[in-house]
Amino acid sequence: MSAVDRRTVLKGVAATGAVAATGISLPAHGRVAKVAPPDAVGLLYDTTLCIGCKTCVVACREANDKKPDTRLSGGLWDMPSDLNGQTKNVIKLYKDPDSPERSYFKAQCLHCVDPACVGACMIGALQKREFGIVTYDSFFCSGCRYCQMVCPFEIPKFEWEKLAPKIVKCELCNHRLREGRQPGCTEVCPRHAVVYGKRTDLLAEAKRRIAESPKKYKGQKKGDPPKVYGETEGGGTQCLYLSHVPFEKLGLPDLSADPVPHVAQTVQHGIYQGFVAPVALYAVLGAVVFRNRKKQAATSGEPGNPTGGAE
Amino acid sequence: MLVGVFAFCALFFAYRFAAGLGASTALNDGYPWGIWIAFDVVVGTALGCGGYAVALLVYILNKGTYHPLVRPALLTSALGYTMASIAIHFDVGRPWLLYRIPLFPAHWNFDSALFEVALCVMTYVAVLWLELSPAFMEKWSQGPAGFLKRTSEKAAPIVDKAMPWLIALGLLLPTMHQSSLGTVMLLTGQKLHPLWNTPLLPLLFLVSCLGMGYAVVVFESALSAGVLGRRRETPMLASLAGVMVPVLAIFTLVRFVDLGLRGRLGLLGTFDLYTGMFLLETVLFLAPAFMLLSQKARSDAGNLFRAAMVMILAGSVYRLDAYIVAFRPGSRFAYFPSFAELMVTLGVVALEVILYVVIVKYFPILSAPGAEAPARTARA
């Protein structure tokens, strides 16, 4: 009777323990966080200036050849419930049930400096390209929706009703930028609530506004000092926000300065750095298999083999 | 009956492609992944780890006695992984473009755990069928003259030569992608509940797939004993169960130590769905360990079978939790699988069972009762 002996069990236990130990004490460095390219562009949206006219929503549709979403209005007028498979930009209204506090909020892709979606995409349908814009190329998209799983802002949307669905999200009107024009939404905003520019300029402008009227702006939670959302959140974003209500109420998550893909990719790189570990493991496995099969062929079943043995 | 079930479900296969994902599933922009990923792929491939668990034992720990388990385990693995691959074609929006993944090496994103899973699984399906191919070739080379016979006689020696490297590949690939299935959810960051979100996800997924793989082998052996009148491999499986006890215990211990070190144990003080599920998983993982604690308990075929069932349940619940229950997108979203989703899943499982029955009937997979299992290369 060939039981799995004590030594084998101990070996297994020791190996599992060792891996676990290295996992728990995983170094928090080991992956270099990406920084915004020097020519990074973006948007700055300021809730104190927005009047909720939705001109930007219409302009976005025109700039991107998207039909109005009339599903909620019985086919009468454009009424998107949220960002969706035909809406890349939307204005939402936040209303506090217990106070007169209210705010508009413009939702579109924030074009992360170190985007989770780009890290997730299997063969680069989503890529960060010129001006740091996160672009989408359906030629490489199999529609797996992993980008939707990982985006902390829930930006990428899917054409659920189509038979060859694509991912839909704001690409900062990069087709217009190439022609020297600005994005649809910023071109039409009557109050300059959303403006387009270089990220460094926008950040400086946002900080200037806070310095000018610190009472007007808020931070992440009630009572936090005012901040520019997107300066550091999740490794930083190229689209920035200023708000007169706490950001959490607008649905912007409380993210640390670590890039969203940081932990997962540190683990992934830790295991697969230079493909050394898998290749080494393969060589060892191959050698052990080869040796053991030879041995087993020579003995052709151990004595006392419960399957009958070769005696 | 099985064929009837499959035929009924096949209507929903057609419906999914005719009507699109929006109409046929309950998936939405908040829950882009549902049971087709979480069950068919993530649980399904773990159930397909029987071949991996047995191969580790036979070829790495050098336990030649387990040889009779190799082929049936390989067959369930090959079928399990093939079914998961089919399920992926239902789930993704543009399945005809999946084939661009291997075709564009210049675009491979090595940062993406999902890419690694995709490429590994594609390769592993091929490796599994190749590892199993001697069973088919043995049969065909004894059959009537023709294409199959000629090919088998030509290919058999080549496959035989390559076998050690195939076996090693068959061990490396699951190690890689089963752990990566954990890394996949790590990237969802804050959306994954902190009781599940830990850098140890790859390790926990790897350990749980080994537990499930072993349990599937026990299940299979009992099934073939019950249905096909084969001899039970109880002594063999009992000694294997001895290995599972510490593995299950370590899995649970690692989880608690990890939560402790991250200062998250306090989360278990809140009574909500997440705490409930976490504790249920803990009970399910520890129960088989206690059931198999004594040598006597391990030698009881019925008890062994029940412990294996609980183990399969434990791993399945853990995986479904990590992929669906503990995944928390914005509050506006909810997900419960649609009827069509459930039927497609059922259809895929039915197809798997049909193929298993057919292949076992016509090809030398289950070693004859009482027959010796010479550890010849042809048996690999």
Image: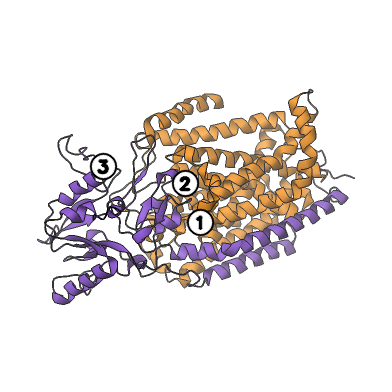
Chain colours: A purple, B orange
Callout 3 environment at 10 Å: few (<14), some (14 to 19), or many (20+)?
Answer: few
Callout 1 environment at 10 Å: few (<14), some (14 to 19), or many (20+)?
Answer: many
Q: Are marks 2 and 1 in contact (CB under 8 Å)?
A: no
Q: Amino acid at mark 1?
A: Gly
> Which of the image's four quarters has the C terminus of chain A?
top right
> Relative to residue A92, is residue A23 depicted above or below?
below
Mark 3: secondary structure: loop
Mark 2: secondary structure: helix
Q: Earlier in the sequence, mark 2 or mark 1?
A: 2
Q: Residue at x 78, y 25 (%)?
A: B143
Name the spot of residue A310 as percent of width and height, x first.
Answer: 87, 44
- Residue A228 occupies quadrant: bottom left
Left or right side of A192 for A24? right
Q: Residue at x 44, y 65 (%)?
A: A262
Callout 2 environment at 10 Å: few (<14), some (14 to 19), or many (20+)?
Answer: some
Q: Which residue is mark 2?
A: B38
Which disc, if any, is residue B182?
A: 1
Left or right side of A152 for B39? right
Q: Amino acid at mark 3?
A: Asp
Count of marks overlaid on the render? 3
Left or right side of B327 for A72? left
Name the spot of residue B117 as percent of width and height, x first.
Answer: 54, 51
Q: Residue at x 52, y 69 (%)?
A: A24
Which disc, if any, is residue A65?
A: 3
Label 3 chain ID: A
Label 2 chain ID: B
Q: Amino acid at mark 2?
A: Ala
Q: Residue furthest front?
A: A179
Q: Residue at x 15, y 35 (%)?
A: A76
